[in-house]
Amino acid sequence: MIVSLNKYREKSRQRGDLWILFLVILLSLIGLAMISSASVVVSYDRYSYNTYYLTKQAVSFGLGAMLMIFCTAIDYKYWSKISVSLLVIGIALLAIVIMPGFGQKIAGAQRWIEIGPFTLQPSEVIKLIYIIYAATWLSSKKEQIRNLFSGLLPFAIVLGIIGFLIISQPNLSTLLVIIATAASMVIVAGATFSHLALAGSLLVVMVISLIQGAGYRLQRILTFFNPSVDPLGAGYQINQALITIGSGGWWGLGFGQSRQKYLYLPQPYIDTIFAVIVEELGFIRASLIIVLLLILIYKIFTIALNSKEPFGRLLASGVGFWIAFQTFINIGAVTGLLPLTGIPLPFISYGGSSLIMLMASVGIVYNVSKYGE
């Protein structure tokens, strides 16, 4: 991992796509504003002051901005050189978090490691690390990617190890995002349809087994098809989210005027923050946030398409798929189009590890836009 950074520092003054950096900053600031409103009641109820979650997210935003700037200044090819070392670190963190006495357990899930006043969520860290590793592996195999045993099998084994550790937390929704991102990158790399069909079949079997093996997951699926079955139990959160969205109408109740955040809507500043956004800002202005996310995703994919170098193309496309899948799953779940999950809305939801890693990833993509085209 000890590779001279100076060797990989940029040597050109070519300007990259500054718009993606601007969009990330804008979305993150919107997120801070909405967290300040959505978390105020829970913050005071738990910690006796209103800005507990806002303060922590603001610190994460500062750290994320610094890391993003750092990543813009490092030649993206450097990450390929240290991809295996990063993967080892990421897997080690996933293993540590599920070890007794190390991981912090919240609401039955053991997904966090305490570091002083902060917590680290390794499953968010591994998303970017695996994208870097996958881009490195797939770009190095070239035509061999069409060979199941020499091209895809080793790639799938690493994904299986990561999947086992994430399911042990448990965190099925994050694993599905990682698998979907990896599968999309494999398509970009040129895998055959038969291999993808085989992988898809195995994935369906795995997901069904995991759902059947955990009662709460099965209950979420049943509630998705009929939220009124258990309105005070498994269906409570989605019912409250839909009530929250319905309360906003076209133009909203006004910033800070949410009624549902008064301990009616669970996790109003994390998984269901988009519902609060619609309630306070209305459907029209909430749609503008979706538009900003779509523009960011579009620009990232444009950078990937314009990249002439395979690693840069796969790296940028992986980040684009990651943000796209998380956006779709979060908003789809909150609006009742998908079963409810614990996936945060990129750049908007509370979550320091998520925000920092997303900002770092966009910093890397910016560098691809400078030197990969």
Image: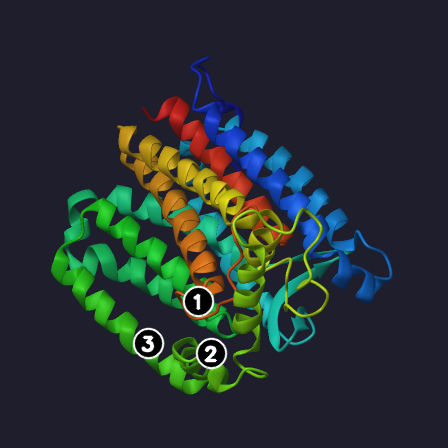
* Residue 28 picture quarter: top right
Query: Which mark sits nearer the N-terminus, 2 or 3?
Result: 3
Residue 283 spot, x, y in % from top left: 50, 49
Eye-nearest disc, 2 or 3? 2
Q: In which quadrant will I find the C terminus? A: top left
Tags 1 and 2 in contact by the CB under 8 Å rule? yes
Q: Earlier in the sequence, mark 1 or mark 2?
A: 2
Which residue lies most toward the right here?
48
Label 1 packing within 10 angstroms: few (<14), some (14-19), many (20+): some
Q: Residue furthest top?
A: 13
Query: Mark 2 is on which residue type?
Result: Pro
Say if residue 90 shows up in the picture.
yes
User: Which residue is at 45% across, 66% downward?
Assistant: 173
Residue type marked 1: Gly
Q: Relative to residue 305, is residue 99 drawn left or right?
A: right
Q: Secondary structure at mark 1?
A: loop
Q: Nearer the viewer, mark 1 or mark 3?
A: 1
Tell me if mark 3 has few (under 14), some (14-19) or many (20+) residues whose alpha carbon lies within 10 angstroms of its own.
few
Q: Residue at x 38, y 36 (%)?
A: 300
Q: Which residue is mark 1?
A: 336
- Disc on the earlier residue, 1 or 3: 3
Name above or below for residue 361 compared with residue 134.
Answer: above
Q: Which residue is mark 2?
A: 227
Give percent across and percent down for residue 348.
58, 48
Residue 124 at x, y = what percent? 53, 55
Q: Amino acid at mark 3?
A: Met
The residue positioned 65% from the left and 76% from the top of the image is 100
- Say left or right for 209 vs 13: left
Q: Residue at x 44, y 28 (%)?
A: 367
